[in-house]
Amino acid sequence: MKLHEYQSKQLFAEHGIPIPHGQMTMNASEAKSIAEELGGRVVVKAQVLVGGRGKAGGIRVVNTPDKAEEAATQILGMKIKDLPVRKLLIDEAVDIKTEIYLGITNDRTRRCPVMIASAEGGVEIEEVAKTNPDKIVRVWIDPLLGLRDYQARYLAACTEMPREHWREFMSITKGLFQTFIQTDATLAEINPLVITGDKGLMALDGKIVLDDNGLFRHPELAEMRDLDEEAAEEREARKYGLSYVKLGGEIGCMVNGAGLAMATMDVIHLYGGSPANFLDIGGGASAEKVAAAIQIIIRDPNVKAVLFNIFGGITRGDEVARGILAALEKTPTKLPMVVRLVGTNAEEGRHLLAKADMETAVSLADAAQKAIAAAEAVEES
Amino acid sequence: MKLHEYQSKQLFAEHGIPIPHGQMTMNASEAKSIAEELGGRVVVKAQVLVGGRGKAGGIRVVNTPDKAEEAATQILGMKIKDLPVRKLLIDEAVDIKTEIYLGITNDRTRRCPVMIASAEGGVEIEEVAKTNPDKIVRVWIDPLLGLRDYQARYLAACTEMPREHWREFMSITKGLFQTFIQTDATLAEINPLVITGDKGLMALDGKIVLDDNGLFRHPELAEMRDLDEEAAEEREARKYGLSYVKLGGEIGCMVNGAGLAMATMDVIHLYGGSPANFLDIGGGASAEKVAAAIQIIIRDPNVKAVLFNIFGGITRGDEVARGILAALEKTPTKLPMVVRLVGTNAEEGRHLLAKADMETAVSLADAAQKAIAAAEAVEES
Amino acid sequence: MSILVDKSTKLLVQGITGREGLFHTARMIEHGTSVVAGVTPQKGGEWVMGGKVPVFDTVKSAVEATGSNTSVIFVPSRFAADAILEAADAGIALIVCITEGIPVQDMMKVRRYLDQMGVRLVGPNCPGLLSPGTAKVGIIPGDIAIAGNIGVVSKSGTLTYEVLHALKQNEMGVSTCVGIGGDPINGTSFVDTLELFEADPHTEKIVLIGEIGGKDEELAAAYIRDHMTKQVVAFIAGKTAPPGKRMGHAGAIIEGGEGTAEDKIKALAAAGVMTADQPEEIPGLLQ
Amino acid sequence: MSILVDKSTKLLVQGITGREGLFHTARMIEHGTSVVAGVTPQKGGEWVMGGKVPVFDTVKSAVEATGSNTSVIFVPSRFAADAILEAADAGIALIVCITEGIPVQDMMKVRRYLDQMGVRLVGPNCPGLLSPGTAKVGIIPGDIAIAGNIGVVSKSGTLTYEVLHALKQNEMGVSTCVGIGGDPINGTSFVDTLELFEADPHTEKIVLIGEIGGKDEELAAAYIRDHMTKQVVAFIAGKTAPPGKRMGHAGAIIEGGEGTAEDKIKALAAAGVMTADQPEEIPGLLQ
């Protein structure tokens, strides 16, 4: 789960990291009054959960409250990478001397958090990794021991931090580490961390991604989810405990198991089709869950055909079949459907579905080809 | 550094462990009013930093505020193991069903904290260890991982805790562990932890010993030290950074190094004498520190002779000699003194001391024998 | 005939009294697994499976009473890390964690601790182990595979069943199927399992089923190139997965350009491993 | 001629710019030790010892620049745990910590971490190591011992000097003197050191200087009984120490009836180790 800049910085501030004075708003006239409070010279920043806001014109520095309102109006009218801007952060403008990158994430191979710093702040770290890899310093943090002072000091030394700022910098690294740990984050990033002319170090921009599996420990963070930033389908899927990713193709897929769902997409692609989505109904799915899954799929206007691929194990084929039938009764559709049912109670399931007007398939290849053909037939018609 | 029962229980309460309502007081009339507030039936408990208060009559359960005042007056007039009682804890009396022992300390051999529980609460755990060792359960806690739920559950199961109390008990074990860690304790003990008739589990008595080396992290705990409970000499020694333990014999010792100081005591004893104290002036001691050490030694009325045993390394013999001379000038004494100086600048030191009326010795055995003879001469005179 | 689980397995089920615990314990017993004990806190003293399996409050007491050497974990995700540590501390040598959804930070601590202790963990978020006809520990349906000499190791659940099914249809048997799970931080890796298969005299060929995310398949490719004498064939799921999106499994995500199916297939090809375009082609590659 | 430190030692001094750091660095160099670098945060780039020893901000940069393999720590107690971990992480193989007063909880964590990494720590709260005439790492005065074939291992500081002095007066030489320190949780133990002496062809006899507290001497006695071929003689300080009182060293305390000098002397006697009644008798026992 991604947090907005304004949310991330708020969490940083709670862990002792200095941030600029500022406030989130959803309307331009409030942007003006916030700018007045902050002394006039402010930065107006689009709050959207994608990168590249700066390049898209979503970040503007202005000198007066009136200009702030003007910029706010313009930015609230923008879309950035298809996402409409609904929220703004109005921050005091600060006097930037140096921009540093400071972030922490998990290193899967070493199985521990890694803190990353670079004197090349203000640009994406992946960009620095490509163009200037020796400008990136990493310290790996023992998950049982936590971040140690000497590691923070090493980052300070390697980013050529002026010595008078080491103490501040070390305190910020600790704050960042605490934020990361205490929110169950998988990424916490300050970019840029700036040395200002007059106010010491400050986190100018921030980004936090939370581990969804850790949210049960943090109900207050779970509430920070910005539902407006999600596709309606994703919201619906989460509600029913389904894993769903929209892809944009024509063949809707409902599969039990993440690996099999990916393989189903891959096989559709292999035979020349294009999958509309990834959808894993999980193990032991109930008829209700199956029904919800189908409604999410058929709501997608791109979908021309639906492929059900169910390998019964814990999930029972008859249960799935009943779910499919229930969903179709509730929301009738003309979309062609191909069903492949194998494993536990597959026979019973196939028997139930035989009553509905559905094509069945034995192998995955067979199912994919039938679904593609059906989708083409729909398009041609 | 030992904490009083009332201090220990306060710290437990701060970590979520239930304790009886109660208050510390230093006078009997206040004890009465506290007893009134608590509803009349209270326990009046001497607060002294030694064990065996109960056997000595320092703990009394009374039924009325008047009886509380009476008990308080009596207990405030007592000495327990030579320590005058200056403080009382007045606790509400609770309805005890079962007494359990729960404590945590460090296991030197395994190099980690060990939490210890026993269904035989209310008596000293060393006593249970002797008489009923299979009634003691231990879990060793990984210093990097901390106490885990399953360990607390294991203690609950093994102390035959009724199941309805497991959740409470586990929360108390966590609170005790947190108290131990967050105060840098070397011992934190609840004895007894009681199951009450009506109020669930409760820590009825508590004991915490802090790691002196960790006190720099806890200035608020360092302030809890009860100066009245220490010998004046020990207070003075701590002020000058000296390690001092009073022993009761006749030969005062001033030594640099803890091991050598113990060896000096042992050798005095070997030749038939009895050491008055352990005193380590530490490495690189200044003249000022040496002077303070001497004053502490000669203030002890039991001392009949003083033995200085200095092995110069970082500590310089001339510096020590100057400290001795300065102290004797400030506080003249007729006590006989034997000096053994070896190592760095020993020659210069001996030269300086030759001016004073002091016996010198080359070996430790020689020094011990001379000091013993001098002490005997004083006694005979 | 197998690795990791066989007739010497004396299984303990953590979370045995839950719905899944009870259901799969019955299936494991049906498959011939010796289930000696269960653990559910607060339920010590009860018996399940028609009075045949005793339930204990703690793993330690269960191990002391029954000599269990392997544990399978069905407890909810918020208690699972603790359950793994409890098993390790009680002397269990092989821990199979089925539970899905354990926070990454919990797993980093757990893994670090287990490494110190030299305890083997399979999973979490995995279907477990099946040595067809001998024993099963976990949730892989017992009837979709027959005994034989092919080792299967996989990050996936149903995709693995798909492959087992295809092998069975071609009358190809399996020594052991190891589901290592698709979490970013887990226990036994592809490399660990390949090492076991290479050393197992009853395993002749190996099927590796990977997916996008991380570098486990690349590490496996390097290991195969340098150490394996037996044939390995593979399937990698997620060729069409978009970057930056988690595809169901917590670990199945292409991040910062890393973890693509292409990279993995390329690395495997460089190690001489043929990768199937679809799961049903696997038996053909093993001919 | 020695264990742990010799001419191959390339020493790094952590806390080199402090008063003690500077003083003892000079003494170590005088004794022939190769001091290649110092570390003091915020002072990287300076030089000490008349411009001969460079100072770095971090141990890692010092090791990278100088190839140091051993570190001695003089930093204040509140920073010492971090300094030990920093040295370990930078690849230092032998860390000698002189600092006194490190909290026990810090040391438990440090020790746990070092054990995982296989790094050797001597101390803390110890005088360090002296291989007379070859090298010294720490604060043992270099002139109180001569080179020879007696290994000395001790929990104490000046008491050790006392024994070294007595040996020298009897013209008995020392291979290496190892001060392991008197803290309740430390690095190298008596047993670890005895193992090294037993394996060292240049050490013929060993002096062990223990004191009240803990069980290290008892463990040493068991080790000597089961594994040592060389003569060991001992002195145990604290026969007259009262129970429950800390005698200077954080670890020198008799608690719950454990750690008495009597118990230790008895255990050593059972292992055939003679214990001197006073330090000056040690040379006589070695005849």
Image (tube, coloured by chain):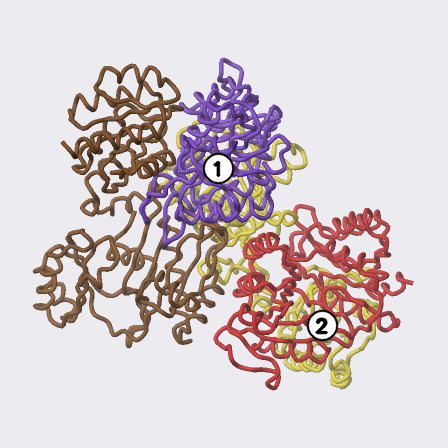
Chain colours: A brown, B yellow, C purple, D red
- Specify whether residue B6 is in view: no
| Of residues A310 and B127, the one drawn nearer to the viewer in this rendering | A310
User: Horizontally, is B190 left or right of D283 in the view?
Assistant: left
Q: CA distance from mark 2 to mark 1?
A: 52 Å
Quadrant placement of the N terminus of chain D: bottom right
Comparing A201 with A257, the one in front is: A257
Which of the two residues, B88 or D275, is positioned nearer the viewer here?
D275
Q: Element at badge 1?
A: loop
Q: Which residue is mark 2?
A: D136
What type is the residue that disc 2 sits on? Lys
Chain of residue at mark 1? C
Tell me if I can see residue A32 in this picture.
yes
The image shows residue D169 at horizontal and vertical percentages of 86, 73
**Residue C163: image x %, image y %?**
44, 30
* Number of numbered markers: 2
Q: Residues within 10 Å of mark 2 (few under 14, many from 20)?
A: many
Residue at image position (48%, 46%) is: C269
- Position in image of residue B296 (x %, y %): 64, 69
- Say which residue label 1 marks: C180
What residue do we see at 84% from left, 58% from top? D233
Q: Which residue reaches farthest top?
A: C50
**Picture residue at 52% right of the left edge, 40% below the top:** C188
In this picture, is A110 found above or below C11?
below
Up/down of A303 relative to A191, above or below: above
Q: Position of residue A293 (x, y in %)?
A: 25, 30
Within 10 Å of disc 1 (Cα), the crowding (few <14, some 14-19, many 20+) is: many
Q: Residue C99 vs residue D65: left or right?
A: left
Viewer-nearest of discs 2 and 1: 1
Dividing the picture into quarters, in which one does residue A134 lie? bottom left
